[in-house]
Image (tube, grey):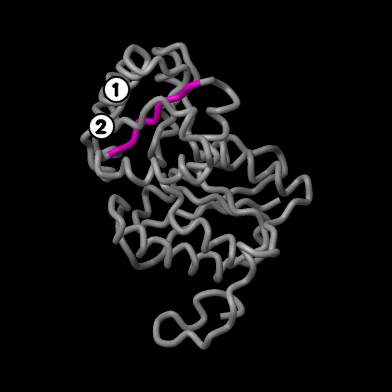
Amino acid sequence: MHIRIINPNTTAAFTRSLARDGAAVAAAGTFVDAVSPSSGTPSIESHVEEAIGALGVLEMIRDSVGVDGFVLACFGDTGLSAAREATGVPVVGMTEAAYFAAAMLAARFSVITLPPRTRIHAERVLRETGLAARCARVRAIDLPVLDMEADPAAALAALLAEARLALAEDDAEAIVLGCAGLTPLVGPMQDALGVPVIDGVTVAVKMAEGLVSLGLRTSKRGSFDTPPVKGLTGPFAGLFRGG
């Protein structure tokens, strides 16, 4: 089985860490790799950057051969619906995966994302999954995405401080980490907090594995049917197979 993680941004070091973290949780016999577009934005923290990143996701799917399932590694699930239109194999968004896992582990959960302006993306996926009532609150720390790798200790301290507020003020029973690339912080945070701490990327890898092993594919009846061929032009020509 081949599961491919798509990083919608262009930061190569981040892509390498996603491949490592995904492979670490994969079952024996599952090959996990990670790819990212050659052009675009180094991080996704706005609606404009989401739109750019979604095009990169489509390019990565178009250029993938022999892949059994995809994981989208951006909180907010950049380009998820378009990706499901562009391929028939399962596509799992890390945000959906994290929320569904949290709902199976706790009655109430809080999300901690970063930076604050990205709360709207996390809240959008809560509405789309129908899990808004299970989320006590979407919180955020004031840390740019690209600063996480530069100072992981500071990121851990900030996340722990906000998580403790979530437990005390929101009555949260689990914490969802609202950014890809935070897998190494899950263990230390669970040890410190005593509640489930959920990283969407690793959960999404396991969910993609499960869907593939069950022989399930994306429905092409209605919502995620292959887009009609309309003669795309310019840089959009051939953006997806059939287009």
- First of labels 1, 2 by sequence position: 2
The residue positioned farthest toward the right in the image shown: 215
Q: CA distance from mark 1 to mark 2?
A: 7 Å
Q: Which mark is residue 7?
A: none
Residue 159 left/right relative to 22: left
Q: Nearer the viewer, residue 9 or 230?
A: 230
Q: Which mark is residue 141?
A: 2
At 59% from the left and 48% from the top, the residue drawn is 32
Give the vertical position of 53 relative to 189 (above or below).
below
Element marked by disc 2: loop
Residue 12 left/right relative to 243: left
Give the vertical position of 85 relative to 179 (above or below).
below
Give the vertical position of 196 relative to 64 (above or below).
above
Q: Nearer the viewer, residue 235 or 51?
A: 51
Residue kind at label 1, given as amino acid type: Glu
Q: Quadrant of residue 159?
A: top left
- Few, some or many residues within 10 Å of mark 1 (<14, 14–19, 20+): some
Which residue bears the numbered disc 1? 162
Q: Quadrant of residue 75?
A: top left
Image coordinates for residue 227, horizontal then vertical, percent: 58, 74
Give the vertical position of 145 relative to 226 (above or below).
above
In the rendered image, residue 28 lying in the magenta stretch gets the answer no
Q: Answer yes or no: do the residues labelled 1 and 2 have beta carbons within 8 Å?
A: yes
Q: Which residues are magenta?
A: 108-114
